[in-house]
Amino acid sequence: MNAGTTPTAAEAFAACFAQPPRVVASAPGRVNLLGEHTDYNGGLVLPMALRDLCVNVAIGAGDTPGVIDVYSDIFRDTARRAITEAPSSHWSDYVLGAVKAAATEQVSREGIRIALTANVPLGAGLSSSAALEVATLRALATFYGVEADPVDVALRARSVENDFVGMPCGIMDQFASSVGQPGAALMLDTRTLDHTPAPTLTGHRFVILHSGVSHKLTEDGYATRVAECRAACTALGVEMLSDLGPADLGRIAEIASPLDRRARHIVTENRRVEAGFRALTEGDSATFGRLMVESHASQRDDYEITVPETDLLVETALTEGALGARQTGGGFGGALVVLLATERVEDWSDKMTRAFPATHVVAVT
Ligand code: ADP
Ligand code: MG
């Protein structure tokens, strides 16, 4: 065992399958600093791959052709899935989908065994699902000796969610996990996949505070927003909502509710990402914090993906001295990302977690 009581993926594999694995790989979760739900609208996002939160995958040859045996230490559970199976709303769907996307032929011949360990909280808006997909694809590439181009891995991982799991997400999570450098934010244009690293704010930290409310993104809320954005595109005669800019806000206001508000969120959120990237470049923490607060308000009022718990936490976070705070990730609960001067992090975290016992600090980055 390594330090503490958490087994590594290799140890979990050995304990589960009574032999060592052949390959180990990992991939990080991510926190999105600005740009929510813009990714499936061809817009801009500003995520940061996380340094200490990842999913680790250990793999080795299986004993039954066409069969995947997979263990997850989070669920303390093993699943046995045939490569030909359809998704079944089980956690192992993400692994089965990744194997189908990368190694159907090889697994049909000899089967595969996989063990997962992870410290990315599930359903917290920190992208445990993308980390799981990317780590699995990386491990499979090494195991079968094929090149794993990071952008290609991100695209395949997204197709696991879209085409297998049935989650109609954009590319942000998988791109941040596969291409991002842990600890560094990047601005990504999700239409062109152009991306630029963003500097960190000296003297400041982003605190990730779990609200205690977990989402399940394959439930209706997310898919409803995706459908509403498509309907707004039709009403506005554009291919993607990110084809629109601030000059279009007048005609956006004329389409039916709630499509008008959904479109307004996307247009204003794209502008906030641009302004946020500029603020990071200029070291302007006050402006970045203000943009985070505006992003939360837009998620609450226009996109309607916040919950009372995260609204109250954002308000209190600011009263307690944060420069900015917003719900991060797909929505309907999960984590907050909060901007604080470094010297205030400890005191602020103590106050918040004491006042809200359901919360805890997941990471400080
Ligand atoms: P998020 O990606 O924000 O954490 P999602 O709802 O997209 O939330 O994905 C969470 C799901 O991903 C879990 O319910 C589970 O099915 C799967 N998952 C993620 N990490 C693991 C893991 N370590 N072991 C097993 N399943 C996992
Ligand atoms: Mg996810």
Image (cartoon, rainbow, N blue to C red):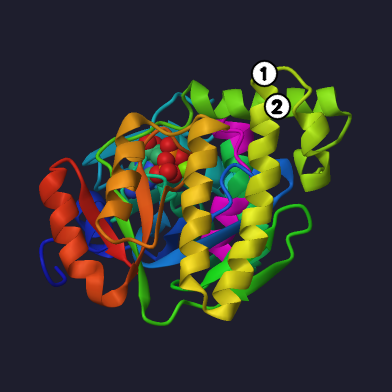
- Residue type beneath disc 1: Ser
Residue 191: image location, x then y, percent: 77, 52
Q: Residues within 10 Å of mark 2 (few under 14, many from 20)?
A: many
The residue under the point 46% across, 35% down is 93
- Residue type beneath disc 2: Asp
The residue under the point 52% across, 74% down is 284
Q: Secondary structure at mark 1?
A: loop
In this view of the protein, can residue 49 be seen by the observer? yes
Q: Which of the numbered marks, if any, corresponds to residue 260?
A: 2
Segment tinted magenta in the rendering: 162-178
Some atom of ligand 1 lies within 8 Å of the CB belonging to the residue at label 1: no
Which image quadrant is residue 188 in? bottom right
The residue under the point 63% across, 48% down is 269
Q: Main secondary structure of the magenta part?
A: helix
Q: Secondary structure at mark 2?
A: helix
Q: Are marks 2 and 1 in contact (CB under 8 Å)?
A: yes
Image quadrant occupied by the C terminus: bottom left
Q: Residues within 10 Å of mark 1 (few under 14, many from 20)?
A: few
The residue under the point 40% across, 31% down is 216
Residue 210: image location, x then y, percent: 28, 47
Residue 206: image location, x then y, percent: 37, 65
Residue 351: image location, x then y, percent: 14, 56
In this view of the protein, can residue 245 be seen by the observer? no
Examine the rendered structure and indicate whether residue 95 appears above or below residue 15: above
